[in-house]
Amino acid sequence: MRSGPLHEGEPVLLIDRKSRRYMITLRAGATADLRGGKLPHDQLLGTSEGRYVTTTRGEQFLLLRPTLAEFVLEMPRGAQIIYPKDLSVILIAADIFPGATVLEAGTGSGALTMALLRAAGPNGRVFSYEVREEFQRRAVQNIEWYLGPVDHLVLRAQDVYEAIPDQPLDRILLDVPEPWRVVPHAAGALRPGGVLLSYVPTVPQAAQMVETLRREGTFAMIETSETLLRPWNIEGQSVRPAHRMVAHTAFITTARKIQPEKTT
């Protein structure tokens, strides 16, 4: 995420008086054709964010760099994204720390990948497996659009159901339909104490993942949760929940890799 003057090639948000959002990429000589008029990019390049700009029709827009959460909601998608409310929980539940070596499967549209790259930092490493070339291509475009070039990301066209060639790992995060098929590979790839996390939308998937983890014998502290986020509208004396909320999206299951007990 850049700071300072706005540069060519970076995304910015333009927010109108009705809170409608338009995400554009700044290009010298280009013009944004908005619902409230036209806005030349040259008027924005080299200036600062956090201010109002005026279109050719006199409409004002708030100019901001998008946060990661805002970018994820506005960016082009190949696969379904993980929503920001879950991204934040995943980073804490999986304990992604600076310098961590992390594996995610699959890459999807790159939302979780970007969150992992920022949390692990330049001294960490993120391996991302994706078997669908079109998803990986879209994810790379999104990642470079928001973060620019990153040296600590390794993308592989690897089927995580078959094997995990990159190890040892501090953390493994699975956004795949059948994460229980990865459990034996994860048991060998994770270091002792490492965290395995799965993200699935249905109860049967979550239940099968938990049962597989228990049978494996090398995982402990198995927990499953979901995250519900309810916005509120506060306008003077009118205080009420929003009419719409992002309720259930997925179940998050975490487990810790342990060394099996020795039998006598």
Image: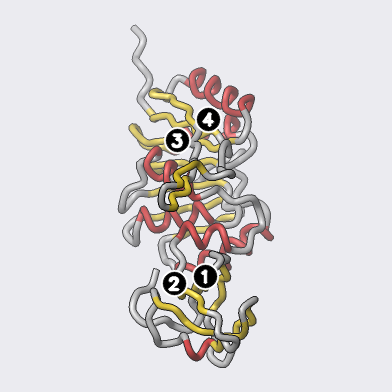
First reached walking from the N terminus: tag 4 or tag 2: 2
Residue position for label 4: 184
The furthest residue to the top: 264
Residue 64: which disc? 2
| Residue at the (50%, 41%) spot, across then down | 241
The quarter of the displayed image where residue 171 is located = top left
Q: Are marks 3 and 2 in contact (CB under 8 Å)?
A: no
Residue 205: which disc? none
Mark 4 surroundings within 10 Å by alpha-carbon count, few (fewer than 14), some (14 through 19), many (20 or more): some
Residue 196: which disc? 3
Judge whether residue 228 can be spotted in this image. Answer: yes
Residue position for label 1: 15
Q: Position of residue 43 (x, y in %)?
A: 48, 89
Tell me if residue 232 comes above or below residue 110 in the rendering: above
| Residue at the (49%, 36%) spot, across then down | 227
| Residue at the (68%, 60%) spot, across then down | 134
